[in-house]
């Protein structure tokens, strides 16, 4: 049993895996930031029914939702350098693999969250928009001050589920050679030929952080609901 699973190896691998955890957090943070921005733009293009842009947004969202994340990652990694070079003569072959991973996750999050924000924005009563216009607010001011804050509040439950899924999906980043916690586990396996202990640690890490995220958003949603009724 010692050769198959070792408590000593398990404890010894914890520092190395935790050292790579910030890479996972970095992917989540960047993908969430740019994903939300892209999602809002896609949602607005569909809501406003902007010619061409609305159709392109629908195609993009359908592609993101209908294809595996790993396939998207390989398309970005192998296809983006070719596209940028042939169209714009921009060479991105020197970019780090982590950059391509972040681009992939950002696009993926944009596609998935676009529908979340679209439904949240459409849930804001039109009467509030009309009232904002009546007091002299511009379209941009109305959206930023009136519509978006309420839409964000409405979107929090779905957004939280999506964020937890994003955190769990970062486990695929090692497929491009990114040394996150999964990538570190692969390196440890190559060096020691023992990886079960690493997977046990990673399982615990993902469970703990996923539960913590869910609890945080449940608390946040309750606070916002309380603030809405007071």
Image (cartoon, helix red, strand yellow):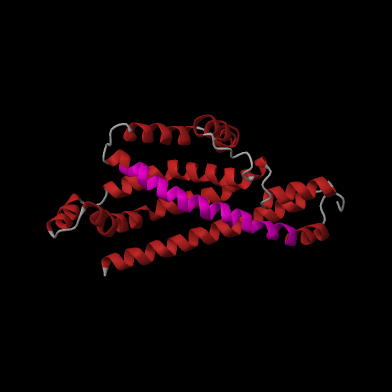
| Along the viewing direction, whichever of 46 and 171 lies nearer the viewer | 46
Question: What range is drawn magenta here?
Answer: 15-44
Residue at 58% from the left image edge and 46% from the top image edge:
99
* Residue 44 occupies quadrant: top left
Instruction: Decide whether residue 22 is among the magenta residues.
Output: yes
Is residue 217 something that shows in the picture?
yes
**Residue 224 placement (x, y as % from top left):** 35, 64
Q: Please, which residue is most extreme toward the front here?
A: 89
Residue at 51% from the left image edge and 50% from the top image edge:
31
Instruction: Decide whether residue 133 is among the magenta residues.
Output: no
Q: Main secondary structure of the magenta part?
A: helix
In this rendering, position of residue 40 left or right of residue 68: left
In this rendering, position of residue 12 left or right of residue 145: right
Residue at 57% from the left image edge and 52% from the top image edge:
27
**Residue 26 placement (x, y as % from top left):** 57, 55
**Residue 193 placement (x, y as % from top left):** 83, 46
**Residue 75 placement (x, y as % from top left):** 56, 33
In this rendering, position of residue 55 left or right of residue 71: left
* Residue 13 occupies quadrant: bottom right
| Along the viewing direction, whichever of 142 and 6 lies nearer the viewer | 142
Residue at 18% from the left image edge and 58% from the top image edge:
137
Q: Please, which residue is most extreme toward the top here?
A: 86
Q: Please, which residue is most extreme toward the bottom here?
A: 230
In this rendering, position of residue 56 left or right of residue 192: left
| Along the viewing direction, whichever of 5 and 104 lies nearer the viewer | 104
């Amino acid at each position: 049993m010692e050769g198959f699973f070792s408590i000593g190896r398990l404890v010894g691998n914890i520092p190395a895996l935790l050292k790579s955890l910030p890479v996972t957090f970095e992917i989540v943070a960047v993908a969430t930031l740019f994903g939300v921005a892209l999602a809002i733009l896609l949602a607005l293009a569909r809501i406003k029914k902007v010619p061409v842009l609305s159709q392109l947004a629908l195609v993009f969202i359908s592609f993101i939702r209908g294809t595996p994340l790993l396939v998207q990652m390989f398309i970005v990694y192998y296809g983006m350098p070719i596209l940028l070079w042939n169209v714009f003569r921009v060479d991105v072959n020197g970019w780090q693999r982590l950059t391509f991973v972040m681009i992939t996750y950002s696009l993926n999050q944009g596609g998935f969250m676009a529908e979340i924000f679209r439904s949240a924005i459409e849930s804001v009563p039109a009467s509030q928009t009309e009232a904002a216009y009546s007091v002299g607010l511009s379209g941009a001011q109305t959206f930023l001050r009136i519509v978006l804050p309420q839409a964000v509040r409405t979107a929090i439950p779905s957004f939280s589920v999506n964020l937890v899924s994003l955190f769990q999906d970062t486990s695929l980043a090692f497929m491009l050679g990114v040394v996150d916690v999964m990538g570190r586990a692969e390196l440890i396996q190559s060096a020691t030929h023992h990886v079960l202990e690493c997977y046990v640690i990673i399982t615990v890490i993902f469970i703990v952080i996923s539960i913590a995220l869910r609890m945080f958003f449940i608390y946040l949603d309750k606070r916002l609901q309380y603030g809405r009724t007071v």
